[in-house]
Amino acid sequence: MDEEQATNIDELFPKLKGESSLVPDGAKQGEPVQAEGSEPSLHQIIGTIAAVIGSDALPEPDRTELRRWAPCKPTPFAFHWLWLSYVPDKMRQESKRVGWMTIFWGIAAMGAKSHRPGRKFGAALGKSGYSRMRFERMLNATDRNRAALLMSGVHFLKAKEERFDWCDPAAFLLTTDAVKWNRIRDRIIEDYIRNEMKHAKKGS
């Protein structure tokens, strides 16, 4: 995993104290486990959720319901199970419900091993040729349109079979503090530009 990325995201999402549903080493995958005194980071939370969605812990019909979701539709049963089992209390605010549903949808839609730790979201979009106009629309979207436009980018990466680290989209969707959100946004933009420049040089 990219150490700089991990540090930046975990600074923006301080570790959460109290109840945890993370799966420790040796535990059966998909079973919520009480880890007393643990402090899960956003990376750990996303990694656990990705593992659960990609495993037999989540029945295929439920995974299908997650993939069929759209922002205009009610949340499926599987959302509520994941929300209550794997999202810590301190990150389960009503204002973050659509953000979490978008994360669950994306991991299910991308298929097995959709979460690639260390592979930055902006870098994946830049390398894959996602248009700058669509990218800027997504990064400048209002709260109401943010999930739908991010879903468009995820559909594009799925078609390109490009996997990425879901922590950047998660931070982008879940952060409510304006200063922290702008830092996340700026990093995604810079990752996109670096990869766009890199591939432009290779083609020259």
Image: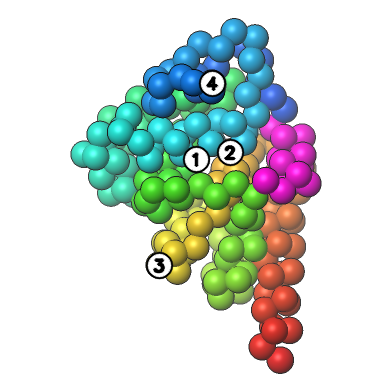
Q: Which residue is mark 4?
A: 24
Q: Residue furthest bottom?
A: 204
Q: Disc 2 and disc 3: Cα gap in Å?
A: 25 Å
Q: Disc 4 and disc 3: Cα gap in Å?
A: 33 Å
Residue at x 67% of width, y 46% of height: 1
Image height check: is 4 above or below 195? above
Q: Is residue 41 left or right of residue 94?
A: right
* Mark 3, secondary structure of its residue: helix
> How far across and down, in percent of the image, does residue 189 sit?
70, 62
Image height check: is 47 above or below 192? above
In this view of the protein, can residue 111 be seen by the observer?
Answer: yes
Q: Earlier in the sequence, mark 2 or mark 4?
A: 4
Q: Which residue is mark 1?
A: 99
Q: Are marks 4 and 1 in contact (CB under 8 Å)?
A: no
> How far across and down, in percent of the image, does residue 31 sit?
39, 20
Q: Which tag is nearer the camera, tag 4 or tag 1?
A: 4
Residue at x 35% of width, y 36% of height: 55
Three-letter code for the amino acid on which mark 1 is drawn: Gly
Q: Disc 2 and disc 4: Cα gap in Å?
A: 25 Å
Task: Compare residues 135 and 157 and report the one nearer the observer.
Answer: 157
Q: Earlier in the sequence, mark 4 or mark 1?
A: 4
Q: Which residue is mark 2?
A: 174
Q: Is residue 19 left or right of residue 155?
A: right
Q: Which residue is mark 3?
A: 159
Q: Is residue 165 left or right of residue 204?
A: left
Residue interval drawn in magenta: 1-13
